[in-house]
Amino acid sequence: MPDLNARPPFSVRLRTTVADVGAPLCVGLDPDPDRLPPRFAQGGAADAEAFCVAITESTAPVAAAYKPNLAFFEAYGPEGWHALGRVCEAVRRSGRLLVLDGKRGDIGNTGRRYAAALYDRLGGDAATVAPYMGADSVAPFLEHAGRCAFVLVATSNPGAADLQHLDVGGTPLYEAAARLAADAARDLPGEAGFVVGATRPQLLTDLREAHPDVPFLVPGVGAQGGSVEDTLRANAGGPILVNSSRGILYASSGDDFAEAARDAAERLAASLAA
Amino acid sequence: MPDLNARPPFSVRLRTTVADVGAPLCVGLDPDPDRLPPRFAQGGAADAEAFCVAITESTAPVAAAYKPNLAFFEAYGPEGWHALGRVCEAVRRSGRLLVLDGKRGDIGNTGRRYAAALYDRLGGDAATVAPYMGADSVAPFLEHAGRCAFVLVATSNPGAADLQHLDVGGTPLYEAAARLAADAARDLPGEAGFVVGATRPQLLTDLREAHPDVPFLVPGVGAQGGSVEDTLRANAGGPILVNSSRGILYASSGDDFAEAARDAAERLAASLAA
């Protein structure tokens, strides 16, 4: 394994990468076997890998980051983890940031072993982390210098309202989760970021006002209905990665998928750079 | 892969397995490389596997279920997933219930791919699931008949209080998570269970009163300080699995680890059967 340890702070690399590329675009790598182009019709781990590598190579000129979705690899067992490793290598070769979307979260040595898998073995620059178990379940993902734990704060799905929007003494639960994440990062070498969906711009506005310097990972533009303009306005120039998965990956269902993905990524990057 | 699909309801199998074995003991399989006996000193995936298989074979006479902790396998990458698969086979061979502790949680096709990994590929009877994203992130783990999604409700770690104990309009958040899980299961073929820590018996009492028939997975006895007597009293005879990991796995640090594990499991099973 390459030495993937010493890295400058995540938010510094986020800023320089976005400046280099020209837009804060993150491409979500969700190789859904039911939606892959005909040449990947077998739908196995090797096809998921080849599809994601092709998408990465095609879109790297305009993407600042890639976000492999671990579920779509894990479903193939060991072969899926081999494929995931090679997709992560392709992202690292591209020079872009690697955000591993596994929504892990656990305490003590268990959390540390997840963090080792994500940061040390796969070489992730960042990982998505679930906060329900509390600060001690987020902390293990903050123990690696130069990495960022994007904690689920206000997600973009309809069910987000079930718990996240409940009032906990004058503030919504998502603000308590945000504070928990920011506080947990205070004495640890890693950084905390927030996952904040684009589907409810007012939450993004509120969270950005309360946390001006925290990196946000924003899913939910495009297929899920969030608007780029609203997202950028709400973000007010803070550090951000705006993720799109399906709108780029499946821009064409034919064998021109890589070119169509690049076109879609270019259009989204242009609107994000505006 | 064997056909692992059609299974009777989880709580029926829980009842019959516990009746056969005599106690609701679940053995947590957390092969921590820093704590394995000398003969597994390499600490790789093969050692994790051999250790867990030996523990399973040694304790099966008194255990109703096994709970592999995915972090300790995933940290080895593809080889870890191979090892995990073989540990799951050993559990299935033992005739005991297989609870996969990965604390996954995600929506739609992503959640379905996690569920496919856990239930179809690894053959889990149950999986632990994180509720922060809401009902639509729990539902994919409830779509498999005969399986149980043990949703994190009130965990046993100190950080549990950070979010789970916040008041959300007259009830604690953990009760809202419990209701969300129970409601999500209503129209789906799988069952919902709750993870409820042994370290705060009053929560167990409250949750059992409100949800008399829901299977509880209870960590936190032994090393974490929860008492068996308090747990059984609070549970009031409901469907339950009481988990112990370290107290059994590391009962001896020598090469008599398997015999020591069986002795520790027998003692705990006896106190749980009382």
Image (cartoon, coloured by chain):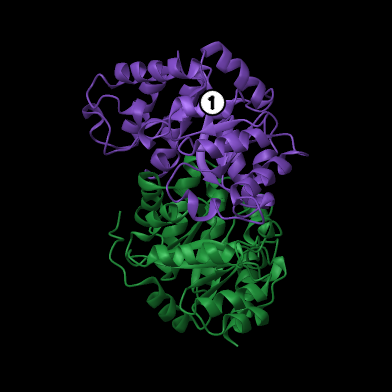
Chain colours: A green, B purple
Mark 1 belongs to which amino acid? Arg
Question: B234 or B142: which is nearer to us?
Answer: B234
Q: Is residue A188 left or right of residue B13?
A: left
The residue identified by callout 1 is B233
Q: Is residue B110 left or right of residue B81?
A: right
Image label count: 1
Q: Residue furthest bottom?
A: A274
Q: Assess disc 1: are there few (<14), some (14-19) or many (≥20) residues with their C-alpha within 10 Å of its C-alpha.
A: few
In the rendered image of this protein, does residue B126 appear above or below residue A262? above
Q: Position of residue B13 (x, y in %)?
A: 63, 20
In the rendered image of this protein, does residue A70 appear above or below residue A258? above
Secondary element at image label 1: helix
Please tell me in which quadrant of the rendered image residue B252 appears. Answer: top left
In the rendered image of this protein, does residue B223 appear above or below residue A150? above
Rendered-image quadrant of the C terminus of chain A: bottom right
Q: Position of residue A251 (x, y in %)?
A: 68, 67
Question: B39 or B180: which is nearer to us?
Answer: B180
Q: Position of residue A18 (x, y in %)?
A: 47, 80
Q: Position of residue A176 (x, y in %)?
A: 54, 63
Q: Chain of mark 1?
A: B
For the point 41% across and 75% down, the residue is A11
Query: Is residue A154 visible to the viewer in this orientation of the structure?
Result: no
For the point 64% across and 65% down, the residue is A257
Q: Residue furthest right?
A: B187
Query: Is residue A204 visible to the viewer in this orientation of the structure?
Result: yes
